[in-house]
Image (cartoon, rainbow, N blue to C red):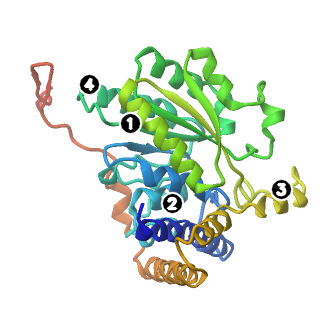
Amino acid sequence: MDKKDYLSLYQEMVVIRRIEERSAELYQRGKIGGFLHLYIGQEAVCAGIGSVRQAQDRIITAYRDHGWAISAGIDPKIVMAELLGKQDGCSRGKGGSMHMADVDLNFWGGHAIVGAHIPIAAGLALGDVYQKNDEAVTICMFGDGATNIGFFHEGLNLSKVWNLPVLWVCENNQYGMGTSVGRASAVSEIRQKAEGYGMRNERIEGMDVMNVRKDVSRVLDTIRKEGGPYLLEIMTYRYRGHSMGDPERYRAKEEVKKWEEEDPIGIFRRYLVAEKIATEAELDTQDDEAEKITEEAVQFAEASPNPGKDELFEHIYVEPTPIEYRGYKLEKESEEN
């Protein structure tokens, strides 16, 4: 990385933080509907992984997806427009908070049903195997709570049976929906769940973006060279509730405050200054630019038109076209049939 890369990575983390903060404000003002799951505190994970993944690597995640969308390359303006349910959003305003996606950027979406995207990730990786995309890795994120349901075990099992190139990433932010990991999981370390499938696994620290970059880069290289799946449990923490409706009665304010002292943006900022990569003034400039980007995103989203009524009937069914499958040409059925 050169200095420009470091500053860009820092700015990305700040933009994600500011977008989330403004999203909380807009939600409280009634401008964002549905559910809203904030990523505040976990920025080092998506920024770190996003900075080392290659263009052919597929990204798929759960409903805490705004940060991932930005790291994958979706313009914050488009992200904010989708949050507000506007036509210029990445899902044309039909998905909202939990359905960010852009397949052209190899970002295969946020998914609202807990763990339901995990088997889809196995399918994406299987598709790369069939198409002989040998350098591609599917990177699939999920929370600690998702590891207690069937989708998780089905997906991991198939990925090992078929030796699929998947990096499974558990963003262990300590809590599911109001429940600590210790009260819901039979094992203290989520990574241990991969042992039942004979899968390589490890737990890494996820509040330091440089640490995330180093470890994830190493694991991605291993998957590219040796094939097969790998489970990473990345230890992080969310500073806000599970969603905006969470009263947060299950954890002490002192606990949150303690974690905030090890803020991922603050850690990275101190690193850049200590290593003489950037000065405080240069980082302040990045903070100001992030504020500007965020404000422009909000203005763009609020000015974007609402989807028209006809949009209810758009993009809900695609008429099939003839395709080739193993040498056979499959024509669509005739009108008579």
* Secondary structure found at label 3: loop
Q: Which residue is drawn at 39% across and 61% down?
A: 73
Quadrant occupied by the C terminus: top left
Q: Mark 3 highlights which residue?
A: 248
Percent across and percent down for residue 306 are 42, 73
Amino acid type at image mark 3: Glu
C-alpha separation, residue under disc 2 versus residue under disc 4:
33 Å
In-front residue for pair 161/298 = 161
Question: Which label belongs to residue 203?
Answer: none
Q: How crowded is mark 3: few (under 14 residues within 10 Å), some or many (20 or more)?
A: some
Q: Mark 4 highlights which residue?
A: 130
Amino acid type at image mark 4: Tyr
Amino acid type at image mark 1: Val
In-front residue for pair 117/75 = 75
CB under 8 Å between discs 2 and 1:
no
Q: Mark 1 highlights which residue?
A: 137
* Secondary structure found at label 4: helix
C-alpha separation, residue under disc 2 versus residue under disc 3:
24 Å
Front disc: 1 or 3: 1
In-front residue for pair 203/329 = 203
Q: Residues within 10 Å of mark 2 (few under 14, many from 20)?
A: many
* Secondary structure found at label 2: helix
Q: Between disc 2 and disc 3, whose residue precedes?
A: 2
Q: Between disc 1 and disc 3, whose residue precedes?
A: 1
CB under 8 Å between discs 2 and 4:
no
Residue 300 visible at all: yes
Front disc: 2 or 1: 1
